Image (spheres, rainbow, N blue to C red):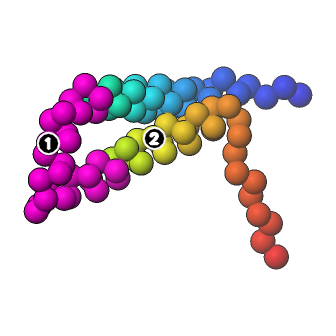
Amino acid sequence: MARDTSKKKRPYFLKTLFFGAISLTSYILLFIHQDWITEHYTKGGYYAAYPIITAFYFSFIHGAFGSNLLSLLGLEAKQSKKK
């Protein structure tokens, strides 16, 4: 009996495409504006929050992309059996 996996993988494909596009665009913008980023992120004071916020942002976007990509490829975490 064959399972129809096309409907199951479709949300993962769209999410992967969405987060991949955001991730790629973010990295491109980061490298294009690296002089401005370096100037403002190294000022100190409340500007010290910028690198922290940026790290959380990239961590979330890249993590969401990676998770959806692995799900799209069919690689899921093994569920542990409860005793």
Determine the residue positioned at 23% across, 33% down: 34
Q: Which residues are magenta?
A: 30-56
Q: CA distance from mark 1 to mark 2?
A: 25 Å
Query: Is residue 34 magenta-colored?
Result: yes
- Say above or below: 66 vs 31: below
Q: Residues within 10 Å of mark 2 (few under 14, many from 20)?
A: some
Amino acid at pointer 2 = His
Q: How far across and down, in percent of the image, does residue 72 sit?
A: 63, 32
The count of marks equals 2
1 or 35: nearer the viewer: 35
Q: Residues within 10 Å of mark 1 (few under 14, many from 20)?
A: few
Camera sees residue 20: yes
Q: How far across and down, in percent of the image, does residue 42 sit?
A: 17, 51
Q: Which mark is residue 62?
A: 2
Q: Which quadrant: the C terminus?
A: bottom right
Residue 29 vs residue 79: left or right? left
In terms of sequence position, does the residue under pointer 1 or pointer 2 come before the other?
1
Task: Identify the main secondary structure in magenta.
Answer: helix
Q: Quadrant of residue 27?
A: top left
Secondary structure at badge 1 equals helix
54 or 71: nearer the viewer: 54
Secondary structure at badge 2 equals helix
Determine the residue positioned at 49% across, 37% down: 65
- Say above or below: 11 vs 66: above
Residue 40 vs residue 62: left or right? left
Q: How far across and down, in percent of the image, does residue 11 sit?
A: 53, 31
Camera sees residue 22: no
Location of mark 1 (residue) = 39
